[in-house]
Amino acid sequence: MNTQARNHIGLSMFAIILLALLGVPRVIAHDLQWVDPHGFINRLLVFIPPIVWILYVLGKRHSVKHPFVPLMTVGAVYGLLLGITHQLLWNMTFETPPALGGNLADLPAAAGSFLTRAFAFISSVVTGTVVGIISGIVATMLHPLVKGRSRR
């Protein structure tokens, strides 16, 4: 299988995965509490990956005609990696795992754990996809400017 082959969105699956992987260090640093969640390093780890995604796609203006879908795809893959990483680090992240409350508090522990983890995973995928969508919107707005500059 040729991982470098471009798909219909203009990026190879290899490029999509590598771009998505740029966000994983922040997930690890956050989950293991290596950085202050409100500190400068965390902000760099939050914003640098989407900026790199946007710059990369804008730099590929000849193969990426419409940047929205490629960046949404990168965001969705990032969301999957985010969810998987959170699941792998779950027991190191929480000294006492989150528990359900209200009407769901009486569920067996295994069911509560499953629901909590499932919703955390879904939330991660949604979060990553939203980051990709926002990046795609920004790149779509910048794309005509970059495209116009390349003709000069």
Image: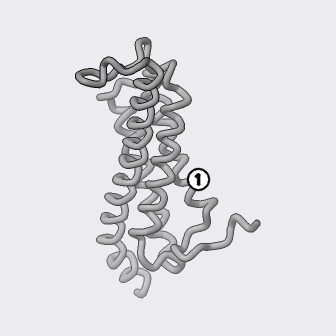
Q: Quadrant of the C terminus?
A: bottom left
Residue 130 in the image: x percent, y percent? 34, 53
Query: Is 100 displayed left or right of 48 in the figure?
Result: left
Q: Residue at x 53, y 54 (%)?
A: 19
Q: How is the image coloured?
A: one colour
Q: Residue at x 44, y 24 (%)?
A: 113
**Residue occupying the far top of the picture:** 95
Question: Which image quadrant for residue 36?
Answer: top left
Question: Which image quadrant for residue 46?
Answer: top left
Query: Is 12 displayed left or right of 95 in the figure?
Result: right
Residue 87 in the image: x percent, y percent? 51, 31
Q: Which residue is mark 1?
A: 18
**Residue occupying the far bottom of the picture:** 151
Residue 103 in the image: x percent, y percent? 25, 24
The crowd level at tag 1 (other Cα within 10 Å; few <14, some 14-19, many 20+) is some
Q: Is residue 139 above or below residue 23?
A: below
Q: Indicate the amino acid at tag 1.
A: Leu
The mark tally for this picture is: 1
Question: Which image quadrant for residue 140?
Answer: bottom left
Which of these two is toward me, 107 or 93?
Answer: 107
Q: Residue at x 39, y 32 (%)?
A: 41
Q: Quadrant of the N terminus?
A: bottom right
**Residue occupying the far left of the picture:** 102
- Secondary structure of residue under mark 1: helix
Which of these two is toward me, 27 or 77?
Answer: 77
Residue 92 in the image: x percent, y percent? 51, 18
Q: Residue at x 31, y 64 (%)?
A: 138
